[in-house]
Amino acid sequence: MLEPIAAAFGVSIAELLSGNAICNMNISGNMLRSKFYVCPICGNILHSMGEAAIHCHGIQLLPSDAEKTDENHKIFIEKVEDEYFIQIEHDMTKSHYISFIAAVSSDRIQMVKLYPEGNPEARFKMNGVKRIFFYCNKDGLFYQNIVKGIDDRKRSYNDVEERRELEKMAKILFG
C-alpha cells in the first residue's frame, strides 16, 4: 500500500515514512553544493548534489556540516604537473582516522577512500577543482577552498597563518 500512497502524494516511500518531503529547487545541481552523508555504523560515504532522504542501517542520515580546516586538521595542497597532491596532517589509527578526501569542481567530484593506518593523502586532476573536502571519523567534515595564486604554485604551504594571509591577498587580487 505504501507505493500507491507515496505516488498519490508525489513523494518517495522514504519521504512518506520519514515525514520529510524533499524539495530540490535546482534540478541541474552544482557539485560545489555537494552534501556528504556518513553512516556512523559502517562508515559508508554517500553523496548528493541536493536534498535527499538517505538511510543506512535503518538510520536516517543527516548531511555533515563542513567546517574550515583547523590547527588539528592541517591540509597541504601541492601542484604536481596537472594534479593536486593533497596531504593531511593527521594520525591514522584504527580508532581515529581520515575516512575520505574529495576534490570538487562545479561539474565533477573526485573521491579517494582512505583506511586506518594508511597515509592521509591523495592525488586529483586539477580540472577546475575549487574545494577539497575530507572527513575525520571523530571530528567530522572539513573543507579547504583551492585559492588561485596559492594552491597552483609549485610548493605547498604548511604554515596556517601564512596561508591565511596569502588567501586574503589572493582574494583581493583574484576576486
Image (tube, rainbow, N blue to C red):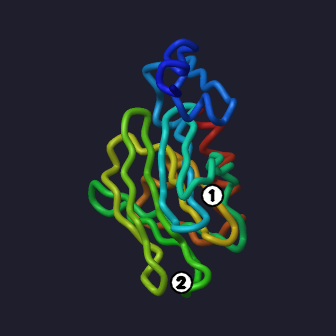
Q: 139 left or right of 13?
A: right
- Return the residue at label 2: 92
Q: Position of residue 114 (x, y in %)?
A: 43, 71
Q: Residue at x 60, y 44 (%)?
A: 170
Q: Is residue 96 above or below residue 150?
A: below
Dot 2: element:
loop
Give me the C-alpha separation between circle 2 and circle 1: 16 Å
Mark drawn on residue 142 = 1
**Three-letter amino acid code at disc 2?**
Met
Q: Residue at x 38, y 67 (%)?
A: 122
**Three-letter amino acid code at disc 1?**
Phe
Q: Position of residue 53 (x, y in %)?
A: 57, 37
Dot 1: element:
strand
| Classed neighbour count for the residue bearing mark 2: other residues with Cα under 10 Å, few (<14), some (14–19), many (≥20) | some
Q: Of label 2 and label 1, which has the lower sequence position?
A: 2
Q: Residue furthest top?
A: 8
Q: 6 left or right of 83?
A: right
Q: Quadrant of residue 142?
A: bottom right
Nearer to us in this view, 118 or 147: 118
Q: Is residue 132 above or below residue 3?
A: below
* Mark 2 in CB contact with mark 1 (< 8 angstroms): no
Q: Is residue 41 above or below residue 90?
A: above
Q: 59 left or right of 7?
A: right
Q: Residue at x 58, y 67 (%)?
A: 41
